[in-house]
Image (cartoon, rainbow, N blue to C red):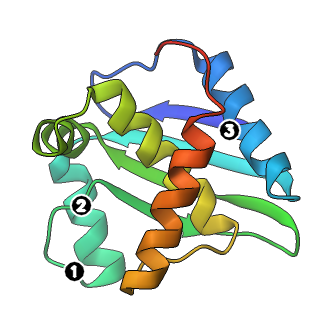
Amino acid sequence: MINFNYENEFILENEAAVASWLSAVIISENKKEGEINYIFCDDEYLHKINVEYLDHDTLTDIISFDYTMGNELSGDVFVSIERVIDNATDFEVSFEEELKRVLVHGVLHYCGYKDKGDEEERTMRMKEDEKIAMFHVEL
């Protein structure tokens, strides 16, 4: 089950369509859907998590905590809407496009994709693009 939670004023429109898309992404990777919680928040909220749990004193757009057991994906995905807005501007894409990228990014981590080195990052971007192309509903 995919759940959406809010720690700020942002509200995701078309929750059902987004959840359906993310479920299809999971199936396309031959994985099973467990419980995945998306928590939308602001920079301050996510920065505190980054410092407390990861010992990183930086802003970030997403932090995912992976609770996957075997082939069943589960976890908590924290998303800073402020970072998504800024990154959309920086990358010259729409907010909706950047949000889809961030949402699928967390699931792809649970599928085993990493993004630490150049090659891993290229693979992750390719997978993000592939999975974004599966989405056919406006946010």
Location of the N terminus (image quadrant): top right
Residue 22 is tagged as 3
Give how far across and how far down residue 130 sits, in percent. Answer: 60, 47
Q: Nearer the viewer, residue 52 or 139?
A: 139
User: In this rendering, would 114 be left or right of 79?
Assistant: right
Q: Secondary structure at mark 2?
A: loop
Q: Which residue is mark 2?
A: 60
Rendered position, 47 above or below 5: below
The structure residue drawn at horizontal position 37% and vertical position 83%, both measured from the top left corner, is: 118
**Distance (Cα) linking label 2 and label 1:** 10 Å
Residue drawn at 11 percent across, 45 percent down: 90
- Measured Cα–Cα span from mark 3 to mark 2: 22 Å
Amino acid type of the residue that numbered disc 1 sits on in the rendered structure: His
Q: Is residue 76 visible?
A: no
Q: Earlier in the sequence, mark 3 or mark 2?
A: 3
Residue 137 falls in image quadrant? top right
- Taking the spot 64% from the left edge, 35% from the top edge, the residue there is 3
Circles 2 and 1 in contact, beta carbons < 8 Å: yes
- Judge depth for marks 2 and 1 and give the one in front: 2
Front residue of 98/77: it is 98
In front: mark 1 or mark 3? 3
Horizontal side of 93 relative to 26 (left or right) equals left
- The amino acid type, in three-letter code, at marker 2 is Thr
For this view, does 85 lie left or right of residue 117? Answer: left
Q: Which residue is mark 1?
A: 56
